[in-house]
Amino acid sequence: MIFVIELLVSFFLVVGAFFALAGSIGSFRLPDFFSRLHGPTKSTTLGVGGMAIASAIYFSFHGEGISFHEVLITLFLFITAPVSAHFLAKAALHQRLHENKAALPPACEKETGPHE
Amino acid sequence: MPAYQKSPIPGNRWLPHPLMTLVLVIIWLFLVNTVTFGHLLLGTLLGIAIPWFTNRFWPERPKIAKPFLLFRFFFITFVTDVIVANITVVRLFLQPDISRLRPRFIEIPLDTQDPMVITILASVISLTPGTVSAEVSEDRQTLIVHGLDVADEKLAVQTIKTRYEAPLKEIFSC
Amino acid sequence: MLSIAIPVAFALLTAAQLLNLYRLLKGPSLLDRILALDTMYIDAIAMFILMGVYFHSAVYFEAALIISVMGFIGTVATSKFLMRGDILE
């Protein structure tokens, strides 16, 4: 394989894995649930998306013909990550998981309302 | 004004969502990973059949007033912001003293009540600088966002409004 | 080059999975566990992609795509269940 392509694939793989690890470190270290939500939604998504693109580049130059179906995984992850984060945040607000209620905006209090 | 009425792309009873048909054909070609005439035909068949059968779930079509602006927003603003946001967030995660973070909720007053624009705005906010959208208030007036490290609330709201909401409003013209 | 990059990426992902596993076992709340499980799904996709590159096989792509779909549906269903006490309304 061409050296430049190999370098590019290696770079994307290692940087993607590093971003995935950083997301997990974030969810490991941070103190409250809403802060932990930031790690998986942003870092892990970008990291795994980058690794899928690395795989697409690798198979395009190494297999038979151009391979681009890995881009589908990237696209799917980028569409679904905000949705699942939004669902988790909504559920957390509903369960009143927030530790410091004083930091909540009034509209939020109204939203979560009395627990049914 | 609802953003759904007349789309510049024509659509009728047999082809209710032309844009969705196009996207489905492209996704099908991506999935089978080859571009042959047979798969193009099968993709077109699926692209016509799926919107036709699911038409009941999407009675309106989104109106994209400025497609060029959408491309610019997606490929320049969005992609660079996602990468910059991740480098910032990773630096916040890896800093030695984690208690220096100032996580808090911020409220963003919305200028539009269009569900499509709010959905895209919330998703973009979730993927960009240190913020995750948590909740839309019942009357669609405010978006509640959780920031990981908010120094200045006013500045954060201002940035989101000018950088993401204004272009989205222009693209969907509402 | 790749013979170094792939083991390094595997090591980083394994560390990430162990941290997720810690969060999954420790909690403290149920939503933390769901979030950890969601992250584990996404990291599993990354591992499958890496396996595909390592064994030079396109078979792993299908598995990765199915895991991504199933993981998303699982996360949405469980958080919806916690929110409403019901998945379909």
Image (cartoon, rainbow, N blue to C red):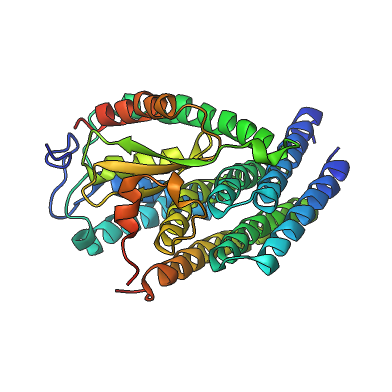
Q: Position of residue B58 (x, y in %)?
A: 22, 55
Q: Which quadrant: the C terminus of chain C?
A: bottom left
Q: Which quadrant: the N terminus of chain C?
A: top right
Q: Could you tell me which residue is drawn at 39 percent across and 75 percent down? A: C85
Vertical relation: A96 (above or below) B129: below
Q: Could you tell me which residue is drawn at 81 percent across and 47 percent down? A: C6
Q: Nearer the viewer, residue C24 or C37?
A: C24
Q: Could you tell me which residue is drawn at 47 percent across and 26 percent down? A: B152
Q: Position of residue B172 (x, y in %)?
A: 24, 33
Describe residue B83's horizontal placement relative to residue B139 as left or right: right
Can the viewer see residue B60 in this picture?
yes
Snapshot quadrant of residue A1? top right
How many marks can you see?
0
Describe residue C28's horizontal placement relative to residue A85 as left or right: right
Q: Position of residue B49 (x, y in %)?
A: 28, 60
Describe residue B114's horizontal placement relative to residue B46 as left or right: left
Residue furthest out toward the front: A102
Describe residue B78's horizontal placement relative to residue A57 as left or right: left
Snapshot quadrant of residue A13? top right
Q: Could you tell me which residue is drawn at 59 percent across and 50 percent down? A: A36
Snapshot quadrant of residue A96? bottom left
Q: Nearer the viewer, residue B44 or B12?
A: B12
Q: Nearer the viewer, residue C40 or B58?
A: C40
Q: Nearer the viewer, residue B94 or A40?
A: B94
Q: Position of residue B30 (x, y in %)?
A: 50, 49
Vertical relation: A77 (above or below) B129: below
Can the viewer see residue C56 in this picture?
no
